[in-house]
Amino acid sequence: MRVRFHSVRRHPSRVLLPLWIILVVAFFTWQAGTYRGVVALLAEWQFNEFGVYHPLLTFLLFVLILAPLPFLFTRRRRKSAAASSAAVPATDVLPVRNNLSRAILEATRFLNVLLFIAGGCFVAALIAVIMVLMLPSVQRPLQRITASTTVPAVPAEGFTELRGNVLYTRTSAFDEDLWLARRNVRFAPMVDVGADPSDIRYFIELSATDGTAQNATESARQGILVRNALPGELFRLYRYAGFRVAPDHYVLFRSLKTMRWPYWVWASEFGVAGLLIGIGALVQWFRRRRLIVRERDLLETGAADA
């Protein structure tokens, strides 16, 4: 019996697939982190239908659907090649070995998809950790500003004393129910004295002792000022309510812990997702290994028969 070995050319998708997966992961990480685009639309639908929004599941849904697309398109070409090789006489080709070879190729490609997605999740978790290190701290000198929509034009991030009217009646709450922790944080707009309360540029994080049904009162608050740090869900909520929130808004956090919390959540969720997908890749690796062993045993049996 004669066995014909075919040389396998390196398909361009072996290079394009990793780049595509990295692009998909990066794009939807950006959309989920900034709460915009199709991620925001799907989040709004979840809020309307279920009253909750699952960021990680939404992110994984897009990634798992879009990441394997190049793999699905290339399957048609491989099926065409397999159909054309079906005309080769059986004496020249081992049909069983060919089926195993195709199964191994499919298993290898699916394994690569899982590995790249898991790697993308770990990279996203690492980026979240790096962003924590880049956040402002209380080490800078204290700046004193008013909650004006025009002055200063670009306030500095960091340790800040913000003075203005706190709009307690416009307080918003943000609840997070994680696997191992639950968190509730409240924000209230702060505007300059005498300014239009519909024009908002600054928000402050409220403590547990702050009232929620008081009138606007003038006060000075100290904390860490961070640009565009209001959760995207609340940003849209204020705009839906008719407030004119400045695109470049600022949030005054009471502590480093609450300021860093969203980034740690992203890091942990991406890390867990990468771990779970990595376990799936390990299972797929064992499946691929069994196919390779079967193919090797078949070749040894065929050589012995020859």
Image (tube, rainbow, N blue to C red):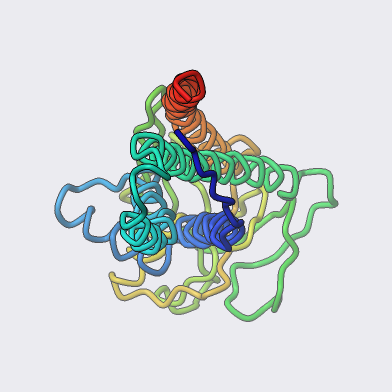
User: Which quadrant would the N terminus be assigned to in this image?
Assistant: top left
Q: Nearer the viewer, residue 67 or 229?
A: 67
The vertical placement of 262 against 298, above or below, is: below
Lateral position of residue 202 relative to residue 158, left or right: left
Q: Position of residue 289 (x, y in %)?
A: 49, 24
Which quarter of the figure has residue 239?
bottom left
Q: Nearer the viewer, residue 240 or 150?
A: 240
Q: Nearer the viewer, residue 204 or 65?
A: 65
- State the residue at coordinates (22%, 53%): 46
Report the label total.
0
Which quarter of the figure has residue 236?
bottom left
Q: Position of residue 210 (x, y in %)?
A: 44, 41
The vertical placement of 110 against 168, above or below, is: above
Residue farthest to the left, as pictured: 49
The vertical placement of 224 against 35, above or below, is: above
- State the residue at coordinates (57%, 52%): 8
Lateral position of residue 293 relative to residue 241, left or right: right
- State the residue at coordinates (48%, 37%): 2
Q: Is residue 218 visible?
A: no
Q: Position of residue 186 (x, y in %)?
A: 42, 45
Q: Is residue 35 visible?
A: yes
